[in-house]
Image (cartoon, rainbow, N blue to C red):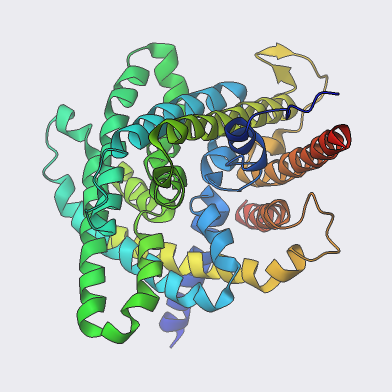
Amino acid sequence: MNERPFLKDAEREGILTKNPLYSSGVIIAPAAAACTSFYSGAVLAAVFTAVTFVTIALCSFVPRKIVYTFRIILYTVVASLVYVPVHLFFMSGEVLSQMYLAVGIYAPLLITNSLITLRTETKFYRLSRAYMMKLAAFYVIGYDLALLTFGGIRGFLSTGTVLGIKVLSFSIPAFSNLYGGFILLAVVSAAFRWLLQILSGAYSETKQ
Amino acid sequence: MTAFLQMLLSAFAAITLENVIFTSAIGTSTLIECAKSPKQLLSFGAFITEFSVLSSLIAYYAEGLLKTETSRLFKPTVYVLCLGLVYILTLLVIRIVAKKHFYALRKYVHLTAFNCAVLGCLFNNGIGGAPLSDRLIYAAELGLGFVLAAYLLAINYKKLSNENVPASFRGFPASVLYIGIIAMIIYSLKI
C-alpha cells in the first residue's frame, strides 16, 4: 500500500487545495475578462509569474521593522518596477505584442494581485525563506495552470477550436463575453472542487 | 426638478449599466469578500470612492510629468505611488480626526488601498487622456457602482452559501455564477 500523499504539502496547497483561482477565488478579473483563449491565458500566466514570483522573492528582504503601510507600498512599487521589463519583453515582437495588447489593462493590474498585497504578509513571510519560495512558486504555478486550462476550455467552447484547429462544428460565442467568463469560471471551479473531493476521498480510502 | 431627475436617472444608469464589476470584472474578489459581511459595505464603498477620486486627482497631475516615451513606461509605478500617498494621507486623517475609530477603520483602508478596482480606475482614466472632471465623475461612479454590486451580492450571499447548494458550487462558484447572471442582464440591457 502506498502511503505517500499524491503531492507534497506545498504542491498540494498551491496547485490544488488553495489554488488561487479555482479554490480560493482570488485574482478573478484577469480570468473572467481577459482570459478568452489558451494564448491569452498564456500571456497572463507569463506576466503573473514574472511579476509575482520576482516581487515576492525580492520583497522577502524588506525588514519587518518597517511599518506595515510602508511595506505594502514598497511591495507594490517593486511589483510595478518588475512589470517594466516584462512589458518591454512582450512589446519586442509583433505577434507577442498583439497577444499582449489584447489582454489590455489586466496585465498591469496584476501588480496589485492579492498574493503580493495580502498573502505575503499573512502567509509567505511568516515561513522560512526556503519553504516560502517553494510555496510561492507552487501558488504561482497553481494560478498559471488555472489560467491555461480556463483559457483553453473557454476558447474551445467559444470558437470550437483547439490551438487554432477547428474541432467542433458549432461554437458558443457567448463564452467569450464577460458574463460567459463568469458563468464558465463558476462551472469550471465547481468541477475542480468536485474532482478535488473525489481525489481526497480516494486518497484517504487508500491510506485506510 | 425635471433636470434634477434627469441627472439622477443618468447617474443611476451610469452606476448600473457602466458598473465596473459587471462590465469589466475589476474588483470581483474584493466584492465577494465584502459581501460576506454586509455591515462593512458602506465603509468599504466610502473608502473605495475616496481612494478612486483622490488618486485620480493626483494621478492626473502626476501624468503630466511623464513626458517622454521612456518615462511613460513607469506609469504603473506613478499610479502605485499616487495610491500610496492617498493611503498614508487617509490613515493620518483618520488618526487625527477619529482617533477612537482608528483601529476599526484601518482594516478597510488597508484592504482598499491596493485594490484592483481602484488601480483599474486609474488605468482606465489614463487610457483616453480624459479631462479631470470626467475622471473624477468616473471615479465616483466606480465607488458607488461597487457599493451597488456589493449590495446585490450581499443580499443573497447567505443563500449562495447555504447547505442546500451542492458542496462544489457553495460559496465562491455560486457567487461568481450569480455575478455572471447579473452581468448578462446588464449586457442585454445595453444592446
* Residue A2 rendering spot, x and y as whole percentages: 81, 23
Front residue of B88 and B119 = B88
| Image quadrant assignment for residue A110 | top left
Circle count = 0
Front residue of A182 and B77 = B77
Does residue B131 show up?
no
Q: Is residue A207 left or right of residue B38?
A: right
Quadrant where the C terminus of chain A sits is: top right
Does residue A199 show up?
yes
| Image quadrant assignment for residue B140 | bottom left
Residue at figure coordinates x 28%, y 23% from the top left? A85
| Image quadrant assignment for residue B174 | bottom right
**Up-down: is A87 above or below A12?**
above
Front residue of B134 and B151 = B151
Residue at figure coordinates x 47%, y 34% from the top left? A136
Residue at figure coordinates x 67%, y 54% from the top left? B172
**Up-down: is B26 above or below A192?**
below
Q: Is residue B151 left or right of residue A101?
A: right
| The residue positioned farthest toward the bottom in the image shown | B1
Quadrant where the N terminus of chain A sits is: top right
Q: Is residue B130 left or right of residue B3?
A: left
Q: Is residue A200 left or right of residue B5?
A: right
* Residue B67 rendering spot, x and y as whole percentages: 12, 36
* Residue A173 rendering spot, x and y as whole percentages: 71, 33
* Residue A97 rendering spot, x and y as whole percentages: 40, 19
Residue at figure coordinates x 41%, y 47% from the top left? A126
Front residue of B133 and A115 = A115
